[in-house]
Image (spheres, rainbow, N blue to C red):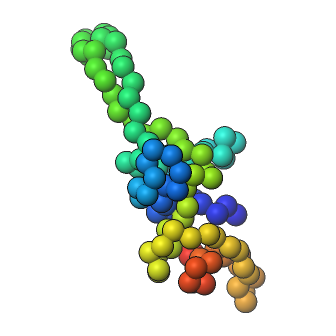
Amino acid sequence: MRKIKKGDKVEVIAGKDLGERGEIVTVHVKDSRVVVSGVNIGKKHEKARQVGNRQIPAQIVEFNAPLHVSNVMLVCPSCDKASRVGFRFKDDGRKVRFCKACNADID
């Protein structure tokens, strides 16, 4: 089980987008990176090209670049604060994440 999953709301704690919040779109486990919607926007210049019968003009495309997982912090749904995540086992044996700030279960 991971501390941060796809669909979680996170806050950026380091870098140029410090303090921004967004939802996790993808998680790259091998690289320890996450892509957060609306955060760490990159620009890519593309040449004009022919695709089938269409001519696509030259353009500048914006995309969400990945951030290292250590630069984001999970936002607790109950207390709405960026907090650390812990793990504990429920009575039925399930492992769940919990917020260390307010001690509430996250899943």
The reply, left or right, for residue 79 in relation to residue 60 is right
Image quarter where the N terminus lies is bottom right
**Residue at coordinates 37% horizontally, 48% vertically from top-left?**
38
x, y percent for residue 20: 41, 55
Does 106 appear above or below 39?
A: below
Return the residue nearer the eye: 12 or 88. Answer: 12
The reply, left or right, for residue 83 in relation to residue 56 is right
x, y percent for residue 106: 56, 76
Return the residue nearer the eye: 92 or 18. Answer: 18
Q: Is residue 6 visible?
A: no
Does 85 appear above or below 36?
A: below
x, y percent for residue 94: 71, 78
Does 10 appear above or below 68?
A: below
**Residue at coordinates 59% horizontally, 60% vertically from top-left?**
4
**Residue at coordinates 24% horizontally, 15% vertically from top-left?**
57
Q: Quadrant of residue 53?
A: top left
Q: Is residue 29 visible?
A: yes
x, y percent for residue 5: 57, 59
Image quarter where the C terminus lies is bottom right
Does 107 appear above or below 34?
A: below
In this rendering, the count of numbered labels is: 0
Return the residue nearer the eye: 44 or 27. Answer: 44
**Residue at coordinates 53% horizontally, 51% vertically from top-left?**
14
Q: Quadrant of residue 74?
A: bottom right
Q: Residue furthest bottom?
A: 91
